[in-house]
Image: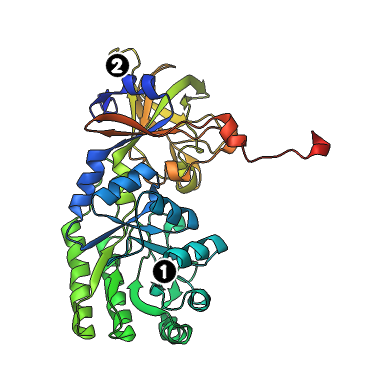
């Protein structure tokens, strides 16, 4: 029967649940390495670590020759912790943002981290504290695209990037501030199709021509989609690369010298590597609807509640029994929120899935949870952060312990007059 599983990464689901508990994010090392290999045509693969910033995942990326992008001081700190440096060509760390906070600026200066700036003010601010800094410009080409309005990162309603007509002013500010503007970055949103991708490539070529011979690197950004639904086709990486390589060659002809081409995947490298293992704690009916209530909520995996994102769902009977009928089922979590539902569309429209018959105690798996799963989890309702486990050749290793209540409360203080 569809939507029935017994193993994750060749390990029995029941064994994983008993050893590590639920809910737990379970990653497969082999899947991540396969996705990295698929992008090897690009000379630089830069992991957008916001998708999944666990130290073990970053260490795995580094071991496989992947450099990283950081969007906060904390992500710079994580990258440094596993041995990345900002040195080299390409640099091991690049900072991308639309503003500097004090923590980020301090780490950038101390470790000489190159910056991909998304606002013109950043050029002047950086020049005051780090003259000679290496900079790329994140250009908003004036249009965007994405599977949700919340992931569309281009156009006049997006806060991301420098408006395309301001490129020359950025170059002037760079010369004035004494920073070395040497690259262009262009990313309009996740899930870009080939029509939109071709339009982005054309916009990059035009922007590069305006920048002139100081251009040394272009970044295709990220947004490479994965097939969250079984019926979806995989992206054609060869076609994706071909479009960008064609643009790069046109840029090289105009610049008169070689130009490096970077790709910046996040979800593509990690999403399919991870299953969120949960346990069904209650099966109930409400009116004509059947519910499976699990021990993970949108504090664990927020994508369905935030974007109406779709994840395939499977059931694993805890007692190994044979399962018969399938039912239209709503899958929801334990939070004190009506929006704590995994089977919903954008706008909060609750839907059902045809799932095998299950009872309390059975296991439920949310697939493709590696991107923006653990990295966006929270302590809402004072719930513990889930454990994370990496399955590799040597076995299964805990890469984040399940949080304790004391750890959640460790930085909170009660004033003496209230004690």
Determine which of the numbered discs, if any, sits on residue 125 in the image.
none
Q: Quadrant of residue 203?
A: bottom left
Residue 135: image location, x then y, percent = 39, 74
Left/right of residue 334 with respect to residue 182 in the rendered view: right
Label 1 vs label 2: CA separation? 56 Å
Q: Residue at x 45, y 57 (%)?
A: 149
Q: Residue at x 19, y 69 (%)?
A: 245
Residue 160: image location, x then y, percent = 46, 67
Closer to the chain start, of discs 1 and 2, is: 1
- Is residue 121 something one can see in this rendering? yes
Secondary structure at badge 1 equals strand
User: Which quadrant is the N terminus positioned in?
Assistant: top left
Residue linked to disc 1: 115
User: Which quadrant is the C terminus positioned in?
Assistant: top right
Taking the view exactly as shown, the residue that stands out farthest to the right is 417
Secondary structure at badge 2 equals loop
Taking the view exactly as shown, the residue that stands out farthest to the front is 110
Q: Residue at x 38, y 79 (%)?
A: 180
Residue linked to disc 2: 324
**What colouring method underlies this structural image?**
rainbow
Residue 48: image location, x then y, percent = 36, 55
Left/right of residue 293 with respect to residue 262 in the rendered view: right
- Is residue 231 something one can see in this rendering? no
Residue 322 vs residue 183, the one in the foreground = 183
Residue 179 vs residue 150, the one in the foreground = 179
Crowding at dot 1, Cα within 10 Å, few <14 / some 14-19 / many 20+, comes out as many
């Amino acid at each position: 029967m569809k939507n029935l599983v017994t193993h994750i990464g060749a390990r029995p689901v029941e064994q994983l649940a008993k050893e590590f508990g639920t809910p737990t994010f379970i990653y497969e090392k082999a899947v991540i390495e396969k996705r990295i290999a698929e992008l090897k045509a690009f000379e630089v693969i830069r992991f957008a670590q916001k998708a999944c910033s666990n130290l073990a995942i970053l260490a795995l990326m580094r071991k496989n020759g992947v450099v990283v992008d950081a969007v906060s001081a904390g992500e710079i700190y994580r990258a440094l912790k596993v041995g990345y440096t900002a040195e080299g060509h390409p640099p091991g760390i690049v900072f991308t943002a639309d503003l500097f906070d004090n923590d980020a600026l301090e780490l950038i200066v101390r470790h000489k981290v190159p910056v991909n700036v998304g606002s013109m003010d950043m050029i002047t601010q950086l020049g005051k504290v780090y003259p000679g800094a290496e900079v790329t410009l994140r250009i908003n080409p004036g249009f965007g695209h994405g599977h949700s309005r919340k992931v569309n990162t281009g156009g006049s309603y997006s806060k991301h990037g420098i408006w395309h007509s301001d490129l020359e002013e950025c170059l002037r500010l760079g010369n004035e501030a004494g920073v070395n503007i040497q690259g262009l970055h262009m990313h309009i949103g996740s899930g870009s199709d080939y029509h939109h991708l071709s339009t982005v490539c054309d916009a990059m070529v035009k922007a590069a021509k305006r920048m002139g011979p100081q251009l040394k690197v272009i970044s295709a950004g990220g947004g490479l989609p994965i097939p969250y639904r079984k019926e979806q086709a995989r992206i054609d990486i060869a076609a994706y690369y071909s479009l960008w390589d064609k643009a790069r060659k046109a840029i090289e002809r105009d610049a008169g010298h070689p130009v490096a081409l970077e790709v910046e995947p996040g979800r593509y490298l990690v999403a399919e590597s991870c299953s969120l293992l949960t346990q069904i704690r209650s099966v109930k009916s409400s009116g004509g609807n059947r519910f499976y209530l699990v021990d993970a909520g949108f504090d664990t995996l927020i994508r369905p509640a935030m974007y109406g994102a779709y994840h395939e769902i499977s059931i694993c009977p805890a007692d190994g029994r044979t399962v018969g009928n399938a039912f239209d089922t709503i899958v929801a979590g334990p939070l004190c929120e009506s929006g704590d539902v995994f089977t919903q569309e954008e706008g909060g429209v609750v839907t059902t899935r045809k799932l095998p018959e299950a009872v309390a105690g059975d296991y439920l798996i949310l697939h493709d949870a590696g991107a923006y799963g653990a990295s966006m989890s929270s302590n809402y309702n004072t719930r513990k952060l889930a454990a994370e486990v990496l399955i590799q050749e040597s076995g299964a290793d805990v890469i984040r312990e399940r949080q304790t209540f004391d750890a959640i409360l460790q930085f909170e203080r009660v004033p003496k007059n209230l004690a």
